[in-house]
Amino acid sequence: MAAEPSAVRDCFRRYFDNRTVPKKVLRQTLQQITSWDSSTADEFLSSLDAVGDGDLNVDELLRSLFGDALQSKQNRVAIYGGAFDPVTNAHLTMAAQIVQSNCADEVWLVPSGPRPDKPKLKTPAVDRYCMCQVAVNTVFTQDFPVKVSDEECLLDEALATYDLLCKLREKHPGWNFSFVIGSDWLQPGTNMAEWDSKNLDWKPGDPEDQQRIVTGHKMLTEFDFLVVKRPGYDVDSTPDDPTGLMKFGPRMSWLKMPEGMTFIEGNLSSSEIRKRTQAEDRVQEAAQNLKTRVMSHLEALRPIEGLVPRAVLSYIRRHSFYVSPSAALPASRKRVAIYGGGFDPVTNSHLTCAAEIIHSQCVDAAWLVPCGPRPDKPRLKTPPIDRYCMCKIAVNFSFSVDFPIMVSDIECFSKEAFATYDLLCSLKDKHPDTDFSFVIGSDWLQPGANMAEWESKNWDWKPGDPEENKTIVTGDKMLQEFDFLVIHRPGYDVARTPDDPTGLKQFGPRLSWLVMPEGMTFIEGNLSSTEIRKRLTITSKSSQASLDRLDDDHDAVLTREEFVEFQEGHHDRANWGLNGLTPPGVISYMHRRSLYQSV
């Protein structure tokens, strides 16, 4: 049995990154792609074990062992770039077709960064990235090799195509990237050899016409291009150029489906989505009263039902994207509960709690606020952008389009998490028409915990000042300036007195219990993010024990099915324990991003 090149690389990575592949499997992999016997393979692996994990470059190791032949066959990634404003069902069908064509092993959607040259592209890059994540992780199964790259979404400006491909090549050495284009890019008047990039050496005072340099010719010789035939955009072929593509570049090839399959295509575009919602704006503008306008705002999304994934439709609705300002719902003062936390990861319990906050009628909306980086919590290793995306997927997958639960990115892109008082002040400044309350549990009101002593970062502190002045107490101001919504936690009671029947006055003047309407019982449970991570740890240890037993059986021979199972790792077993505890889209996201693999 010959080992698949991509599996070889994955096998080495899993072994040296987190020892989730037994040495026996790695030995068998080596024997499949070399003429070594088992003792030679064992001797080689023993020598590698002596190398520190941080000093081992798997890509360089494979190149030194097997040359470029192995590398050139593995990890073929098709880059599918675009604005995705918004992502549509047609984009997803296209991505799937690329995988099913066998022209690539994976497809990466790469939403472009900000485009100053395209003033109509107003949707923030981060939101277009999140919509793609929501779409991919709620439409495809978790093992289907379509992913979303954040390579551009956090930049100040979109990358030129050549610069993007160079950056990916540098970041993922040994992987083979191809760029997906349509045959409409190969028509008279368009010349990819003339595409340019930003001149990074340019400085003020240099000639303006030197701000950009032509890189198209290098791009066409250094990278592969996968061409999708567009109806009405043909390319002439000749006896010397039967594909018709050689005249455009030496590394272009048509996307072709396997024999018997027809390429699925259509004319749906993001422009059509925006056009339909804008056409409905006129209906909203004509509405006279608030109730009618609310209903018409929902009706504005009806023309795009079935054209974008349902969770993306929810996302669009929650952010009021693609409607004109005059057609948007009128601003009115509203009450918003801030539900903060690590959400590492977000669970069904978090979603239930957020829903119950709305059902209590204590507020008009609830916002989940994933915290920023927490240097004081070394176990919080999951990047904020991932925790933010998981919350986005969960909310838009789980709730109807008009259920008033949102996810805020106010901390997601900061260098570190905000103190609670600073967070609430920032929200108040950003949304002056909103009354914010902060959600806490009664476990925060126990002996030894004093919210009045909570601190904030002292922004006036500078090196040389006393270390103890780095933070300042702001808890007293926080309790005076903001409302707090208290959820009773089982086992965490608060003493009540005749003078303080709620038991909350002793902690601050603006605390109130979350109380459900008459006849409703608050739904609660003991599910936590910690439990999710703990289950992943238990599953990982159980799987490792099985691998260790297999490793002890030195002479056993794996079947092809067993070999493939080990190449794929233990995600399936781990994810089995998460079903019903977090939305399926979140599990898919965790799988695609390889989160919590070594918790």
Image (cartoon, rainbow, N blue to C red):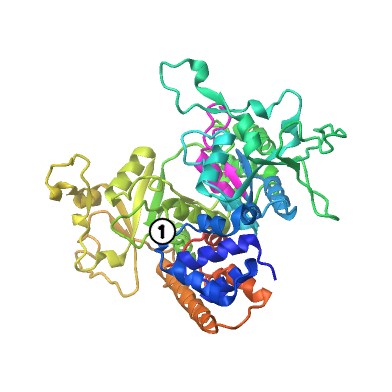
Of 484 and 368, the residue lying toward us: 368
Is residue 379 visible in the rendered structure shown here? yes
Say if 446 sits above or below 300 in the image: below
Q: What segment is highlighted magenta in the picture?
A: 108-132
Residue 401 visible, this angle: no
Q: Residue at x 52, y 37 (%)?
A: 113
Image location (x, y in percent) of residue 387: 45, 55
Percent x, y for residue 589? 54, 58
Position in image of residue 201 (x %, y %): 45, 26
Q: Is residue 37 above or below residue 205?
A: below
> Mark 1 = which residue?
55
Specify the quadrant that holds the N terminus: bottom right
Q: Residues within 10 Å of mark 1 (few under 14, many from 20)?
A: few
Total labels drawn: 1
Is 130 contained in the magenta span? yes
- Give the camera-side residue of 570 and 2: 2
Looking at the rendering, in which quadrant would you find the C terminus? Answer: bottom left
Helix, strand or loop under label 1: helix
What is the x, y in percent for residue 364?
44, 50
Residue positioned 57% across, 76% down in the render:
38
Identify which amino acid the numbered label 1 is placed on. Asp
